[in-house]
Image (cartoon, rainbow, N blue to C red):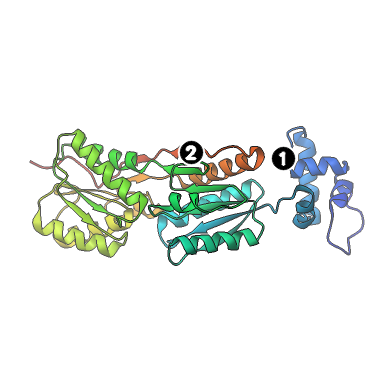
Amino acid sequence: MSTGPELSRPPVMEDVARVAGVSHQTVSRVLNDHPNVSARTKERVEKAIAELGYRRNTAARSLVTRRSQTIGVLGTEMAQYGPSNTLLGIQQAARDAGYFVSIAGLREVTPDTIKDALGHLMDQAVDGIVVVVPHPGIMEVLQNITVSVPLVVAGAAGDGGLSGVAVDQRLGARLAVEHLVRLGHRRIAHISGPVDWIDAAARIDGWREALAAAGLEASVLLEGDWSAGCGYRAGLALAAERAVTAVFAANDQMALGVLRALHESGVRVPEDISVVGYDDQPEAAYFTPPLTTVNQDFVELGRLCIELMLERLETGGAGKAAVVTPGLVVRATTSAPLG
């Protein structure tokens, strides 16, 4: 492979073709992941790209394709683990598909703020928009707003003309509670997230459904706010009353607070009270004891969001729904109750 003289200007596709010893069309095929390119040729082109420091001219490309290669993301509550990791999953999947991401964050969620933010993204000529707003009523609001690009909602099932990808939160909660029931627990408390969150409401439903299926009463429900401090206060109350032998917290942060409160109160985990969290944060395996929890695959969530987006861009078809299945991760905070 001959590099030729150094360039006094940014490299273009023709330079890559010359260095790789292939045609301009072959370089284009490699850049667009065309299947009819041999692995050896692709390797030569990619080596030339790296050697020259070539970067695709997206402005010129957009004139041809009439696409900006940018996907907008409308989000809120980005400081929370679920929304922030959903965003990371979307960014990774978009990048893998050759798209950039432009983010518009909401401080408050109203029909007007959503409409304004969508308009802001449309002004940037995005090819499509993923909405990460985990509050009830978001689908109804979006149904009443007309935009000229595909919309995909992360965290809610598709509805009508909207595509949606959601983790099966009810199933995740049922997995947690069914695990505790199988161990022999009959008094299982739930510390929920804020009830104005779609995920929190679904996990409450799953907790109730699993208890009802086992013939047990759903009598101890404490509303939380996702924070470790909230879990700590709930844990102190549960330790003082000792009315339950297990607690299912709606996220790992609240479960962490529960573990601290139980430890300070002299209540052993899992011997006296078992604890299950939700999310499977990377730190969960290093809690004391390591936390039994429910895993959400945010990488898969992001991949499906982008997959549905690209399908809508290519076919212009109707909205579709996709579901991500959560999984139980059993560690050391759960065991059979004593006595």
> How packed is label 2: few (under 14 Cα within 10 Å), some, or many (20 or more)?
some
Element on which disc 2 rests: strand
Q: Quadrant of the N terminus?
A: top right
Q: Relative to 254, does residue 316 appear above or below in the rendering?
A: above
Q: Give the percent coordinates (x, y) of residue 53.
A: 78, 57
Relative side of 43 to 166, left or right: right
- Left or right for 339, reference 224: left
Q: Residue at x 18, y 34 (%)?
A: 214
Query: Where is residue 236 drawn, in percent x and y?
Result: 16, 61
Q: Is residue 256 visible?
A: yes
Q: Amino acid at mark 2?
A: Ala
What residue sits right under mark 2 in the picture? 321
| Residue 292 shows in the view | no
Give, as a three-letter code, the residue at label 1.
Answer: Asp
> Are the residues tagged 2 and 1 within 8 Å (C-beta)?
no
Q: Along the line of sight, which residue is nearer the eye, 243 or 259? A: 243
Where does residue 229 sit, x and y in percent of width and height?
Answer: 27, 65
The residue lying at 75 percent from left, 55 percent from top is: 58
Q: Which mark is residue 197?
A: none
Q: Secondary structure at mark 1?
A: loop
Task: Work out whether 312 lies above or below 132.
Answer: above
